[in-house]
Image (cartoon, rainbow, N blue to C red):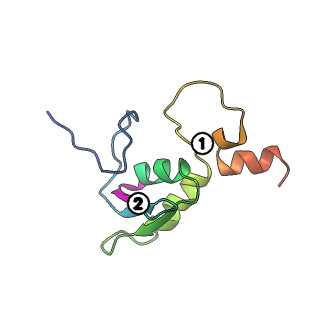
Amino acid sequence: MDHQRCPAAHPDDPTPCAGRVAVTVLDAVNAGADGCEHHGARLLASLAGGRVYALPDAPSGAAIRVFKAAAGTRPFCWADGPRTEPTQLSNIADRLRHGR
């Protein structure tokens, strides 16, 4: 059985989609991908200067849920290895580490 995943799912990320495609995540130069809230958050967490927008038929609050989830998700969270550099930590973890 072939399980299609949303365009925001990174090929190395083994997690399945959670729900339907609901958001568009854009990078700093406006390249983007549509995705479910789960993969949208993981993608947003892995981008510098990324933004998220709800699609017109998205459930209410989808973009803010993705934004909040991304803040607590480390970049490329599916990759193994210790994470100690600021660019490898979630935004929240980096702020806590530096007392901000």
Which residue range is magenta in the image?
A: 31-37
Q: Read off the residue under disc 2.
A: 31
Q: Position of residue 72 (x, y in %)?
A: 62, 49
From this view, report whether residue 42 is shown above or below residue 81. below
Circle 2: element type: loop
Residue at screen point 35% across, 55% down? 35
Quarter residue 87 falls in? top right
Query: Which three-letter amino acid code belongs to the residue tagged 2?
Result: Ala
Horizontal and vertical percent position of residue 60? 41, 72
Left or right relative to 99: residue 16: left
Residue 27 is covered by the magenta coloring: no
Please, is residue 16 above or below residue 63 in the view? above
Residue at the (52%, 39%) spot, across then down: 76
Horizontal arrangement in the rendering, residue 53 relative to residue 90 (left or right)? left
Q: Is residue 68 above or below residue 53?
A: above
Furthest-bottom residue in view? 56
Q: Earlier in the sequence, mark 2 or mark 1?
A: 2
Measure the alpha-carbon separation of dots 2 and 1. 21 Å
Residue at numbered disc 1: 74
Does 83 sit left or right of 67 as displayed? Answer: right
Mark 1 belongs to which amino acid? Arg
State the image coordinates of residue 56 (x, y, percent, origin top left).
32, 75
